[in-house]
């Protein structure tokens, strides 16, 4: 199999083409070895025909192509599917490696030139603006980015397969080593062939759904492999660049970049996430943090052989060792017997105290660390002693990074968010209040009455029930979650869980219910001085278009309540609000969702400012274009500058985790670009008044465009009676649920209603069938209605594309979606719809809208073709398509056969397996599918 990659404009791209050819050749050898020359011939024939059809559609060739696919014998067909799927896995590895290679080449050849998007570039830019150092320090104190891992099921690749990918990537990187001998190079080739053979003989499909704890382990993999080291390195680079540009200043950058997690805390629609699972998750996270610290300290011991026969350590260090001898029994760690090497003696006791943290019976003793600050104190004590005898190079190299790691990861590794559906809280509250004799009909109360009652209960220090009160299992579990959070904050530190997210927030009572439950568990109370102490914040999740409209009024209602306002004060006058990109897109379409989210951000910020509250917005983005997916730095810069003052949270989920964070080089570049975007955004938020006034006229235009797009979108999705049939029958939606890629059900309820379908399978299905409909549908109609044949209006949109960052981002995302969509192949999927009338009517609408959207975007951008502005991506998509196409045609054939059998009351496990293999293959080929 030969190459599929963009030529690009860089002279280094021949190395990428070389790697793809190299891996393709190895795969070809494995195919011959495993399936004989016949298998490779089948794969090559299909590939060549697909490539020729992409170059020029010839009806005769098309029929021959389809017939070749349809006449494949099952045993060969199965292997052909796997061959194309594995080829894409290898291409993806080569492209990721090349990204790292390009950055290294740039740094090696650029000399004093600074790479765009780097930390050094933004620091130099800020210096060039002649900003006072005090303002830069203020900006560093204001910026905040928390990236939150979720277990949203869009990663179709097994962990075992990702491990093989990592080994292949490392070996491919080693091939770039110019000092390799001929024999070493040949040995590497043999190892790579072994890995590709192992990949061929490894099952890509999970035999069961992962458990929640499996998902926790998957998330922790990225901390263990990359993030524990990479995140501190980003801080080091920022401090280095600041010191270089402002050499007369001392810099210690505040902790602005962290990772959080939902995995083990997100119980919305997932009954498997219980309070016990949340507790186990926190234990697992702590154990990894302890393991990493012990690993680093053991390595440090090997290097810290300083002897008191040569140097003089501080009295402070000697005293601390004497105290450790009296307090800590060395049980699992060998004592260091050379008393003249005090650092090694001290580190031995530190290792034992870390080891003791795993033993519950040592909870109350001085033989273990209880808070991360205690470990930091010991490390700083060593740091001071090293500097005392001028070993500052060692302090800077060994201690500085570890101290930063403890500051970032503590003993909890990552803050765990808890999320639950608002209805669950209302159900539990109704039962609790009935048991307590407060209200027999809470659920029937109006919103105003609920608010009055809950606010009164929040102000009353008395508990509603004792812990032994008999409740239903669901209500008991609801309260147990809050008790678990209280226990966890005491055990793992207050930062282990700080946020409680409420899905489908529809009113102020939804947040008040959570705070009343928090009060019951001791997470909210009034101190002796009369001030509120609150260690948990209720955060609303506004998901649908109607929710976004209602959000400012809901928050205003809450800020008007005296006790709730005290809650916010107790959290530093900072309130977190989550906005859902997936459900808003599913509800209103891509154009409307993006616009309404922007308006909600501004209106909520304006509302909070009236009450002296800063907002931390949590952006619930997915990996796919239809769920707000885009590169991390672009997603930060896409926010209105005035809305980022309280910090930003962004979900990182599914296949995005492995594509961004499985390799250190790519993880570093992504986080470096994010830091650059954060500082750029912080500057713009302070100096953007003039620009925002200029954009006000464009906002009026966008408001009208959004309304037209929403009507067009909802006419099809909600008001066409045949749409749901079209969707289910022309996409692999039913089969995606059998892929075993997540512990959470694909529907919130056991319901066939569109409203109860989760956004992930909605987007995943449209991507698999090559429509990508959620990412572009209705845009063309909206733009055309605004222009209405008026050249001046078209020129206005062209100006907006050049000068209005929001509009440019919108148009470029639409371009990407149109480029990845393929309605010729989508028509094949539509052929599975049984009702001819439904198929013809709806597919015609989709086809016309696709053409309209493409035409309008080219008129707005002035381009000849879609993605002319990003030729490397354009070429990559163009070259990938012929390799994805065979999998799409095979998927249609297999779905048709499988569904026919199931309609007749039968089933075929092997046929289903082949369908699932095509899903994996298409996901690898198109990338960011969910």
Image (cartoon, helix red, strand yellow):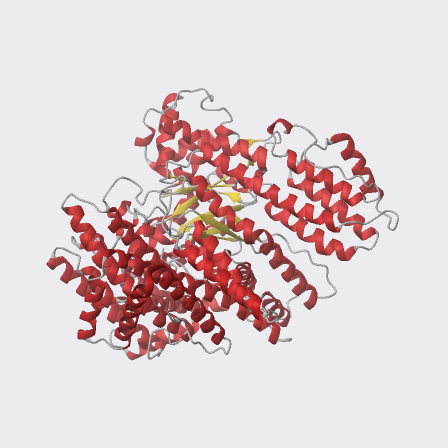
The correct choice, above or below, for 320 with respect to 821 in the image is above
How many numbered tags mark residues here?
Answer: 0
Left or right, 225 with respect to 370, comes to: left
Residue at 78%, 34% (x, y): give it: 323
Which residue occupies the extreme right position in the image?
309
Left or right, 369 with respect to 499, comes to: right
Q: Nearer the viewer, residue 841 or 183?
A: 183
Measured as percent of width and height from the top left, residue 260 is found at: 51, 47
Q: Nearer the viewer, residue 302 or 511?
A: 302
Residue 495 visible from this viewpoint = no
Measured as percent of width and height from the top left, residue 713 is found at: 25, 59
Left or right, 263 with respect to 205, comes to: right
Q: Quadrant of residue 207?
A: top left
Q: Quadrant of residue 274?
A: top left
Query: On the rendered image, what quadrant is the N terminus found in?
Result: bottom left
Query: On the rendered image, what quadrant is the C terminus found in?
Result: bottom left
Measured as percent of width and height from the top left, residue 19 is found at: 47, 69
Residue at 32%, 73% (x, y): give it: 857
Residue at 75%, 53% (x, y): give it: 395
Measured as percent of width and height from the top left, residue 868 is found at: 38, 76
The correct choice, above or below, for 3 with respect to 514 in the image is below
Residue 232 visible from this viewpoint = yes
């Amino acid at each position: 199999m030969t190459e599929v990659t963009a030529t690009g404009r860089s002279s280094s791209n021949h190395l990428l083409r070389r790697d793809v050819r190299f891996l393709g050749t190895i795969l070809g050898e494995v195919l011959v070895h495993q399936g004989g020359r016949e298998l490779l011939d089948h794969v090559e024939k299909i590939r060549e025909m697909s490539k020729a059809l992409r170059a020029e559609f010839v009806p005769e060739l098309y029929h021959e192509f389809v017939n070749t696919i349809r006449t494949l014998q099952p045993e060969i067909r199965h292997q052909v599917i796997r061959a194309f799927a594995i080829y894409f896995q290898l291409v993806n590895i080569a492209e990721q490696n090349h990204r790292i290679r390009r950055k290294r080449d740039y740094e090696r050849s650029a000399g004093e030139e600074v790479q765009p998007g780097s930390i050094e570039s933004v620091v130099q830019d800020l210096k060039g603006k002649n900003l006072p150092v005090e303002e830069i320090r203020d900006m560093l104190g204001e910026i905040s980015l928390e990236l939150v891992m979720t277990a949203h099921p869009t990663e179709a690749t097994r962990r075992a397969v990702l491990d093989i990918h990592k080994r292949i990537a490392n070996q491919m990187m080693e091939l770039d080593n110019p000092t390799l001998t001929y024999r070493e190079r040949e040995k590497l080739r043999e190892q790579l062939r072994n890995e590709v053979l192992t990949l061929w003989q490894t099952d890509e499909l999970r035999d069961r759904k992962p458990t929640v704890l499996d998902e926790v382990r998957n998330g922790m993999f990225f901390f263990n492999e990359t993030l524990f080291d990479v995140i501190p390195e980003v801080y080091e680079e920022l401090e280095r660049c600041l010191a270089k540009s402002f050499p007369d200043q001392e810099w210690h950058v505040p902790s602005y970049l962290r990772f959080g997690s939902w995995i083990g805390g997100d119980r919305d629609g997932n009954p498997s996430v219980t309070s016990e699972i949340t507790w186990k998750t926190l234990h697992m996270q702590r154990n990894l943090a302890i393991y990493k610290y012990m690993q680093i300290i053991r390595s440090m011991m090997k290097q810290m052989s300083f002897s008191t026969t040569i140097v003089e350590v501080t009295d402070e260090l000697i005293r601390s060792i004497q105290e450790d001898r009296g307090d800590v029994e060395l049980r699992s760690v060998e004592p260091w017997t050379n008393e003249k090497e005090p650092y090694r003696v001290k580190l031995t006791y530190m290792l034992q105290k870390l080891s003791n943290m795993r033993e519950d019976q040592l909870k109350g003793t001085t033989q273990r660390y209880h808070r991360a600050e205690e470990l930091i104190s010991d490390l700083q004590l060593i740091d001071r002693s090293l500097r005392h005898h001028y070993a500052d190079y060692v302090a800077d190299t060994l201690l500085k990074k570890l101290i930063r790691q403890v500051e970032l990861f503590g003993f909890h590794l990552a803050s765990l968010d808890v999320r639950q559906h608002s209805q669950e809280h209302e159900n539990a509250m109704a039962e609790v209040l009935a048991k307590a004799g407060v209200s027999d009909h809470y659920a029937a109360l109006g919103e105003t009455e609920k608010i009055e009652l809950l606010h009164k209960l929040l102000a009353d220090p008395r508990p509603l029930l004792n812990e032994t009160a008999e409740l239903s299992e669901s209500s008991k579990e609801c309260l147990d979650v809050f008790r678990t959070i209280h226990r966890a904050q005491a055990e793992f530190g207050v930062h282990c869980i700080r946020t409680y997210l409420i899905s489908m927030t529809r009113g102020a009572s939804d947040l008040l219910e959570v705070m009343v439950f928090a009060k019951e568990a001791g997470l909210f109370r009034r101190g002796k001085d009369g001030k509120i102490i609150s260690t948990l914040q209720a955060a609303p999740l506004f998901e649908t278009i109607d929710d976004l409209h209602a959000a400012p009024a809901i928050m205003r209602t809450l800020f008007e309540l005296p006790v709730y306002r005290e809650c916010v004060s107790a959290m530093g006058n900072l309130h977190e609000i989550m906005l859902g990109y997936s459900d808003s897109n599913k509800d209103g379409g891509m154009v409307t969702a993006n616009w309404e989210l922007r308006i909600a951000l501004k209106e909520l910020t304006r509302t909070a400012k009236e009450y002296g509250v800063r907002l931390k917005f949590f952006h619930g983005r997915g990996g796919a274009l239809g769920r707000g997916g885009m590169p991390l730095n672009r997603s930060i810069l896409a926010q209105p500058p005035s809305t980022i003052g309280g910090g930003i949270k962004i979900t990182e989920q599914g296949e995005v985790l492995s594509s961004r964070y499985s390799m250190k080089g790519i993880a570093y570049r992504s986080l470096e670009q994010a830091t650059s975007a954060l500082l750029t955004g912080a500057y713009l938020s302070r100096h953007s008044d003039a620009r925002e006034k200029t954009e006000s006229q464009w906002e009026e235009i966008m408001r009208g465009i959004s309304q037209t797009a929403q009507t067009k979108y909802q006419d099809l999705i909600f008001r066409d009676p045949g749409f749901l049939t079209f969707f289910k029958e022309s996409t692999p939606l039913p089969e995606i649920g059998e892929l075993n890629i997540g512990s959470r059900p694909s529907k919130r309820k056991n319901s066939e209603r569109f409203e109860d379908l989760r956004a992930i399978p909605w987007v995943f299905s449209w991507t698999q069938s090559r429509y990508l409909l959620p990412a572009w549908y209705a845009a063309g109609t909206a733009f055309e209605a605004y222009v209405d044949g008026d050249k001046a209006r078209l020129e206005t949109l062209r100006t907006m594309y050049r000068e209005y960052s929001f509009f440019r981002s919108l148009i470029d995302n639409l371009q990407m979606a149109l480029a990845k969509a393929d309605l010729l192949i989508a028509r094949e999927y539509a052929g599975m719809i049984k009702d001819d009338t439904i198929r013809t009517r709806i597919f015609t609408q989709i086809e016309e809208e696709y053409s309209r959207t493409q035409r309008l975007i080219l008129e707005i951008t002035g381009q000849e073709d879609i993605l002319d502005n990003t030729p490397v991506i354009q070429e990559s998509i163009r070259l990938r398509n012929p390799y994805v196409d065979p999998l799409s045609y095979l998927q249609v054939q297999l779905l048709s056969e499988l569904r026919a059998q199931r309609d007749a009351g039968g089933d075929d496990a092997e046929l289903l397996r082949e369908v699932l293999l095509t899903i994996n293959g298409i996901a690898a080929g198109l990338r960011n599918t969910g």
